[in-house]
Amino acid sequence: MGDVMEDLSSITPTNECEEHVFIAARHMLKALGASKNVSNDLRRLLADVDIHLSRRTNITETVLDGTREVEERLKLAQEKVMRWESNRSMIWASGHEEASEYLQAVYEIQRLMESLRSSPSSSSGKQKELLDRAHSVLQMAMERLELELLHILAQNKQSFEPEYVSFRSCEEDFVSDVSIVSTEDESIGDTSRRDSSGTESENHIVDLVHPDIISYIKSIANVMFASHYDQEFCHAFTNFWKDALDEYFFTLGIDKLSIEGLLKMEWNCLNCKINKWIRAVKFIIRVYLAGEKRLFDQVLGEFGSVYSTCFVEASKGSMLCMLNFGEAMAIGTRRPEKLFKLLDMYEVLADLLQDVDSLFSSEIGSFIRTEFHELLMKLGDTVRATFMEFGHEVALYPSTNPCNRGVVHPLTKYVMNYINVIVEYASSLNLLLGGVQDGAELVPFDQNISLDNFCPLAHHLRSLMSYLEHNLDKKSRLYKDSSLKHIFMMNNLYYMVQKVRVSKLVTLVGGEWIREYTAKFQNHATNYERGTWKPVLSLLMDDENKTRKSILKERYRSFNISFEEVYKNQTGWFIPDTELRKDLQISISQKVIHAYRTFIGKNSSVIDEKHIKYTADELENFLFDLFEGSPMRLHSIHKR
Amino acid sequence: MRATDNQGSFLNRISIRRNQVVSMDGNHEQELEDLELFQKHVADRFSDLLLPKPSSAGDSPSGADALLSIAWFRKLLDAFLCCEAEFKAVLVMGRDPAQFAKAPLDRLIPELLDRAVKALDVCNAITHGVEMLRQWKKLAQIAVTALEQRPIGEGQVRRAKKALTTLLTSMAFDEKESHHGKSTDRNCSFGRRGVAAANKDKTAGNCRLLSWNFAKSWSASKQIQAMSSNLIVPRGGEPTGLALPVYVMSTVLVFVMWALVAAIPCQERTGLPTHFPVPRQLGWAQPVIGLQEKIGEEWKKKEKKGTCGLLEEIQRMEKLSQGLVEFADGFQFPAETDDVAAMVAELAAICENMEEGLVPLQQQVREVFHRIVRSRAEVLDVLDQVGKLSTPVPY
């Protein structure tokens, strides 16, 4: 092959027409030299060229001056073109030979037109007429080629099944429908937010058409460009893909909604749309558009910048449509339940930033690039504002009725589970919250811990939890019984500590925080014991004076009544955490039983066995009924 | 003054001034002055748009910034951006946020925000419409390329005719069926071919230049109606002077959106109001009313025949395309081409004009979009402050 190439390149074309053939031939040889193997199709095509050559040798060798000869050749080419005008079947669908013959005919017309134009007698009537005829035939052929192109594209457009994109159905997930008011369960925390499905499809570029037919499309592009019908080709090609992308949106379940419509939409419904949007954006930008750009490059790459212009034209409308959805989300209300979805959107866009920059790297694509960057920034702002708004809500969440039985408040659960999810987005949030005032003016929170070592998010989370603590403190004041207030605080603070301890939060807010809050809930436990049991146990305390029998008996009776009263009350209170409950029960029991035994032992002369209402063991067992959440009465069960 | 400069956040300034107690009288005087200036500037800017200053060269009726031309719209959007910046200064700067919670602003501000959201959707529809104009320009350009060749033969004529027929079909389609969204079965230029009939579903894509960007039910004319329906002239004795600037700005916004919808292909325009009431006695309103009457007249004239939009370039493009198709229909080789040459030259000039003007116009529409978003956010921030002020702070 190399020899042939050298041979050819050393020959100088003798006229303009020949020059074209030379350029084409050189180009072909170069391409052949570069490609390793020659497919059968190509072989056939080359053979075809060979046939043409042998048929034409005589003609190309002589200089084209005879108008008659031009007319003959034009007639031949015209016949080939006209033959398909009355034919219902498509050329490219009828086989390679048909297609290449057709292309040859078109190139022949081009050659003839060139020679007619350059011929010295081009102003003669006959020449003009021939040129006009050639133009007509060429126009006919171009219309036909455009049709063929669209047919090929439509027939070979690859479809991407929705499952290929692996859409998760639109279940409402976790925080989405939970407003701050109504979280009774703990469903927030254990949802892993990122599902890994679909990663395999994200990392490779798809073929928008079957790879085999790219050469067909290219052959049409080449001949249309060579005939100066590049505008028609680009128009048809670009619009085809514009429509295809449009339809694909539809397949992906992306509705075209107005911003007004989106702003008015119910959160559940919107949430569902966001999920779809996130998947669609990722797939369309990373996979689909990357494939589209490659196709445009393959087909139009050699014609210069036109390929990127066409690509931007074909994708701009849909990109804007996608971005507008983001705009709508960025200007929507800043409800806490939206935070994670906003973060998801933010992260997906941040992740795609480089892809977009390279897809739309051209000058004409800068419009999309800028829009994309701006949207990312806006979403970041909205995330930040939503996060701050959440802190505000936590601090100001109103307290109306005290929490029944002193249990963990729904707000505590919501906030802690919420924070647990927030941690998943630590890197984004650290970026977004850096340098933001944490709103410490809202609640004066403990400044005795140095915060310098913490990342912005940790800083904000600590404030958030201190808002929560202050709000809980406010709520605890609703209890009339100060002991129950302590149980409530203990339960809630303990819950917070546990939530931090078992999650990634621990590394973020640190052991110091855990120690601080552990001390806090323990303090409440101590205060509880002091509040409830100190007065009760004081009845069993020794007097300095020798106590009179009647007073001792009276004290014992009072103790029993007080104990029964506490029992009646506090069996109804509830410490949900078994461990915490046991700890407190044991702590109480140690103090109470010890005091009781001492009292009974010391005063056995006064209070003999028949006066003893409860044995120490019985009393100890009763203590283990406390904080179980079901109120009981002692005298009723003690009737034996 | 270019309108593109970043306005920054007015919020910062508000929060600084938030707690300052300004004496009511001094403040009031300043306020009245600002208000007066704002109205004067609105009047000036719209007067310029109504009667463009004669440029050095003799102005032809279809001069560079003729009414409803691309250049005119670019001036209009610039004027909008300037008015908007000034309005925001009047509304938000140095303002005690508590005023927003009092009548009449407690009603006017939500209406303003609602109008803003509607305007965003109109901007999007227009961005989309400009994209369609660019498509039309490309088709016209094909015809120009074909007919600029000499001699003009049947091939060139057919080529031009094909492009222009597609163009005119798209223009007519836009008017008649635009709201039928997904319909692809259009009368396209391949219709006469047997082969096309067999492949209609596949080839129709070529004729369908663009589908609309919203759900079928969305209608530009309804948006405009909704935006203008609650435009009520403030009564004289409003407690704060702010009702008036809100009204002025809303009128400007509605006017700009209305003009855009009338001029640029847009989803569902039937029933577009030809005017909305603006009281004549207000000084700034005169040029707005003048423009409204002119455009309204145009719309009334064109609406009956069906129009692809009042944009001056498109009107001429349509007429020239029809003329050239007529020429093509009666074409016999060899033909007298002098008339055609003039038409082609004009079409070529329009194409060039569009090539230069449409992308900047589109970007400007987008800028208006972003500006409205930003202003809305700033007003919301103020409302947010009001909300927080009214909540008793517990600590």
Image (cartoon, helix red, strand yellow):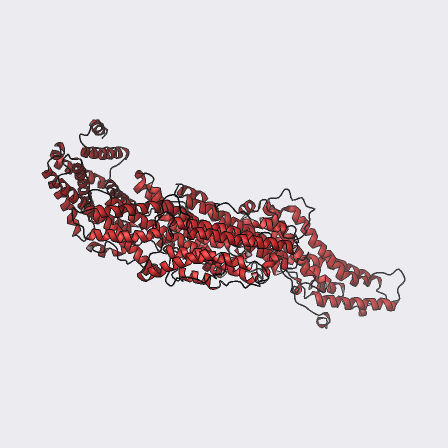
Question: Which residue appears farthest toward the right when viewing the image?
Answer: A545
Estimate the x, y position of residue A283 in percent, counting from the top left.
41, 49
Estimate the x, y position of residue A547 in percent, counting from the top left.
88, 64
Estimate the x, y position of residue B282 in percent, counting from the top left.
50, 59
Q: Is residue A273 visible?
A: no
Estimate the x, y position of residue A38 in percent, counting from the top left.
24, 37
From the viewer's perspective, is residue A553 above or below residue A308? Answer: below
Name the residue at 32% across, 62% down.
Answer: B304
Question: Which residue appears farthest toward the left when viewing the image?
Answer: A68
From the viewer's perspective, is residue A636 above or below residue A296? Answer: below
| A333 with respect to B211 (left or right) | right
Q: Is residue A364 visible?
A: yes
| B368 with respect to A391 (left or right) | left
Instruction: Count the labels in the image.
Output: 0
**Quarter of the image with the C terminus of chain A in it:** bottom right
In depth, the one of A514 and B173 nearer the eye is B173
From the viewer's perspective, is residue A36 above or below residue A216? Answer: above
**Quarter of the image with the N terminus of chain A in it:** top left
